[in-house]
Amino acid sequence: MIIYIDADACPVKSETYRVAKRFKLKVVLVANSQMRIPDADWVTLVQVEKKWDAADNWIADEVVANDVVITNDILLAERCIKEKKAHPITPDGTLYSMNNIGEALARRELASRLREWGGPESGPPPFTKGDRSRFLQTLHLTVERIHNEIEPR
């Protein structure tokens, strides 16, 4: 199991490192730009071209079943679930699955249509301590569940 981070604007890198270290997992950050990462052999930065969706495409190509993907991109989350059986988690702690990805895609499409029709253009709500805590809990429980399924006690 590897944790992939869609890293350019990810606010929960340090929380991801804590969980990965606890479970002895590799973390791969994928970004369009250079960034600082911990000096650890289990953390890698992959810098992709500065093209639209380059990081998403790289992650979708590399991820395999039971990997975890940290992303806010719903289309990447859908690809990871449907094509690879991976586990996408948003930085605010939403774990996407076959049960809820359709609803997330519908909300995304509705928001896009409303913007096209001149509706309100509001961005995402501010990131909170509660979001960070929810993310940490969701990531920990997800990794623990996958780990137990792969290597039953």
Image (cartoon, rainbow, N blue to C red):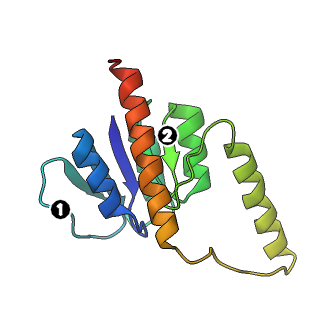
Q: Is residue 19 above or below residue 152?
A: below
Drawn side of residue 128 relative to residue 82, left or right: left
Q: Dividing the image into 4 quarters, which one contains the N terminus?
A: top left
Name the residue at the right extreme: 117
Q: Amino acid at mark 1?
A: Pro
Which of the two discs, 2 and 1, labels the residue nearer the N terminus? Answer: 1
Residue 72 versus residue 142: which sits nearer the camera?
Answer: 142
Secondary structure category for the residue under label 2? strand
Secondary structure category for the residue under label 1? loop
What residue is at 45 percent from the left and 64 percent from the top?
132
Q: Amino acid at mark 2?
A: His
Q: Position of residue 122 (x, y in %)?
A: 70, 80
Drawn side of residue 70 relative to residue 16, left or right: right
| Residue picked out by circle 1 | 38
Q: Is residue 123 above or below residue 44?
A: below
How crowded is the residue under tag 1: few (<14 C-alpha within 10 Å), some, or many (20+)? few
Drawn side of residue 50 relative to residue 34, left or right: right
Q: Any mark on residue 87, and which?
A: 2
Label 2, label 1: how many angstroms apart (C-alpha)?
A: 24 Å
Residue 22 versus residue 27: which sits nearer the camera?
Answer: 22
